[in-house]
Amino acid sequence: MLSLQLPPELEDRLQRLAQATGRSTTFYVTQAIALHLDDIEDLSIAEQRLLDIRAGNSQPIPLEHVVHGLKRR
């Protein structure tokens, strides 16, 4: 179970959308999280990778290797 407090303006928008569509506010909150959670997780991984590269603990992967599926040397 998750409890969430939204800023009043977001809560109002969410309530209006739910009323206009006949869906629950929970439905829309779940949809929003599902749509964006992958992106947030990817960003977190990328930020950690950048910190590792800057600290010298990891090497960057050349774009050419990413685009063409080449293996690291």
Image (tube, rainbow, N blue to C red):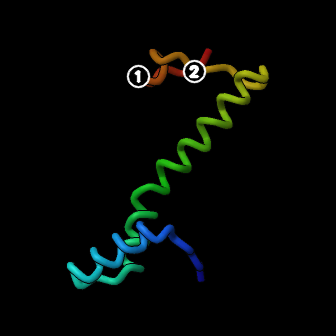
- The local secondary structure at tag 2 comes to loop
- Front one among 71 and 35: 35
Kind of residue at badge 1: Val
Task: Give the label on residue 52, or none.
Answer: none
Instruction: Give the image quarter of residue 44.
Output: top right
Point 34% across, 70% down: residue:
13
Side (left or right) of 31 relative to 4: left
For the residue pair 22 and 7, the one nearer the viewer reads as 7
- Work out whether mark 1 precedes mark 2 in sequence or the reverse, and give the earlier one: 2
Residue to which mark 1 is pinned: 67
Q: Is residue 21 above or below residue 13?
A: below
The residue carrying mark 2 is: 61
Q: Residue at x 27, y 74 (%)?
A: 17
Residue 34 position by quadrant: bottom left
In the orientation shown, which residue stands out farthest toward the front? 8
Marks 1/2: CA–CA distance: 10 Å
Q: On the rendered image, what quadrant is the N terminus found in?
A: bottom right
Q: Residue at x 59, y 36 (%)?
A: 46
Residue 70 location, x and y as percent? 48, 20
Amino acid under label 2? Ile
